[in-house]
Image (cartoon, rainbow, N blue to C red):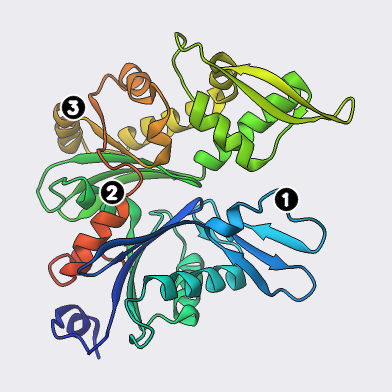
């Protein structure tokens, strides 16, 4: 059966399921056709080191990060938006499929998966293989910026320029969209995970305090800012590696702003490069319409004000920055034939 026949098909087998997946470095979201978002879980898997058996997936696995001991290992099977551990990814997806299925007798699902715009052919093959081995019947791929643009309501099919910046866990995607395609883009493998690493590195360097991934993420959420006027304080506990004992230090917003300075600068530079690659006619549209921010990184306090100052353009943060990509993929899933031009061939 050809791809157009698959896309046109309106009749669905009894108990069939179609799903859209935002397969992210930090979190995976699943949208089920006709039911909306049915699952949102961390992209984490814990496995037995000796047997490679899966111990936990998703939220339960994330609770084990930094606490697994010698026998069990907690892994994030995606790094920088792409699969780095195929076996763990397959196990994670299979578990998520089972949770998302309306009935245990449902047929193998048809999947629309969001992928980074800079994905390579090898990485595309890895995604397809992981989904098919996890139980997918048909697999369609869509670049994340296009799905996010549909999710925030941008007119992707219009002959006008719309710019979207998705600051995710592993990547920052910058895309100018016109006529159902990406007219200019820039993708860097910098995102929320690098922010966590930067915070952990800063605390180690300036406070001799070792903290784990979960603690660094909590600090980012509580104190993450690019604004000089922010002055909040949070007690952060970790291991004082000089004395080898647990210790707690009061950490200020100023510390986290300094910790995130290089990462935020990389995101700003990526947007500049994206603008430089934009055709002049589309650039004039962006001057008028501005830039839309999505992804977890857009929650960093003051990021919109900073980017407005750096680019001179209006900046708007999406109403649903964490879920707009999968919501857009869900809209596309409901009418694949209409949105077929957005899909990766």
Q: Dots 3 and 1: beta carbons under 8 Å? A: no
For residue 44, say whether it is visible.
Answer: no
Numbered disc in front, either 2 or 1: 1
Say left or right for 166 vs 249.
Answer: left
Residue 252, quarter of picture: top right
Say left or right for 345 vs 280.
Answer: right
Say left or right for 315 vs 75.
Answer: left
Disc 3 or 1, which lies upstream in sequence? 1
Say left or right for 74 vs 316.
Answer: right
Return the x and y of residue 241 as percentages of the image width and height. 84, 30
Furthest residue toward top:
229
Query: Considering depth in this image, is 100 or 137 the residue closer to the camera?
Result: 100
How far is mark 3 from mark 2, CA to CA?
A: 23 Å
| Mark 1 secondary-structure assignment | loop
Q: Which corner quadrant holds the N terminus?
A: bottom left
How far is mark 3 from mark 1, CA to CA?
A: 49 Å
Numbered disc in front, either 3 or 1: 1
Query: Considering depth in this image, is 103 or 132 the residue closer to the camera?
Result: 103
Residue where numbered disc 3 is placed: 287
Disc 2 or 1, which lies upstream in sequence? 1
Residue at position x 13%, y 81% in the image: 10
Return the x and y of residue 152 as percentages of the image width and height. 21, 45
Residue where numbered disc 2 is placed: 324
Check disc 1: other Cα within 10 Å, few if <14, some if 14-19, many if 20+: few
Residue at position x 16%, y 31% in the image: 289
Residue where numbered disc 1 is placed: 67
Check disc 3: other Cα within 10 Å, few if <14, some if 14-19, many if 20+: some
């Amino acid at each position: 059966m050809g791809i157009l026949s698959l896309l046109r098909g309106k009749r669905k087998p009894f108990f069939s399921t179609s799903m859209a997946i935002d397969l992210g470095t930090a979190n995976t979201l699943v949208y089920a056709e006709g039911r909306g978002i049915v699952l949102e879980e961390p992209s984490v898997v814990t496995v037995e080191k000796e047997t490679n058996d899966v111990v936990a997936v998703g939220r339960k696995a994330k609770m084990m990060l930094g606490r697994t001991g010698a026998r069990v290992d907690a892994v994030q099977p995606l790094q920088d938006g792409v699969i780095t551990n195929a076996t763990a990814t397959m196990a994670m997806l299979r578990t998520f499929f089972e949770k998302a299925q309306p009935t245990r007798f449902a047929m193998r699902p048809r999947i629309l998966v969001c992928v980074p715009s800079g994905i390579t052919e090898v990485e595309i093959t890895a995604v397809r293989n992981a989904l098919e081995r996890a139980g997918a019947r048909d697999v369609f791929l869509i670049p994340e910026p296009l799905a996010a643009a549909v999710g925030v309501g941008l007119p992707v099919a219009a002959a006008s320029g719309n710019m979207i910046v998705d600051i995710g866990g592993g990547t920052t995607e910058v895309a100018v969209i016109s006529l159902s395609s990406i007219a200019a883009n820039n993708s860097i493998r910098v995102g929320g995970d690098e922010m966590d690493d930067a915070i952990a590195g800063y605390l180690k360097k300036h406070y001799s305090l070792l903290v784990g991934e979960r603690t660094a993420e909590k600090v980012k959420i509580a104190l993450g800012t690019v604004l000089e006027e922010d002055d909040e304080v949070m007690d952060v506990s970790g291991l004082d590696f000089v004395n080898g004992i647990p210790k707690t230090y009061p950490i200020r917003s100023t510390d986290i702003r300094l910790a995130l300075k290089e990462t935020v600068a990389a995101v700003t530079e990526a947007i500049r490069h994206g603008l430089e690659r934009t055709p002049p006619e589309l650039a004039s549209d962006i001057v008028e319409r501005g830039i839309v921010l999505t992804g977890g990184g857009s929650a960093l306090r003051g990021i919109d004000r900073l980017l407005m100052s750096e680019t001179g353009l209006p900046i708007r943060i999406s109403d649903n920055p964490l879920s707009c990509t999968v919501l857009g993929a869900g809209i596309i899933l409901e009418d694949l034939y209409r949105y077929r031009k957005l899909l990766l061939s």
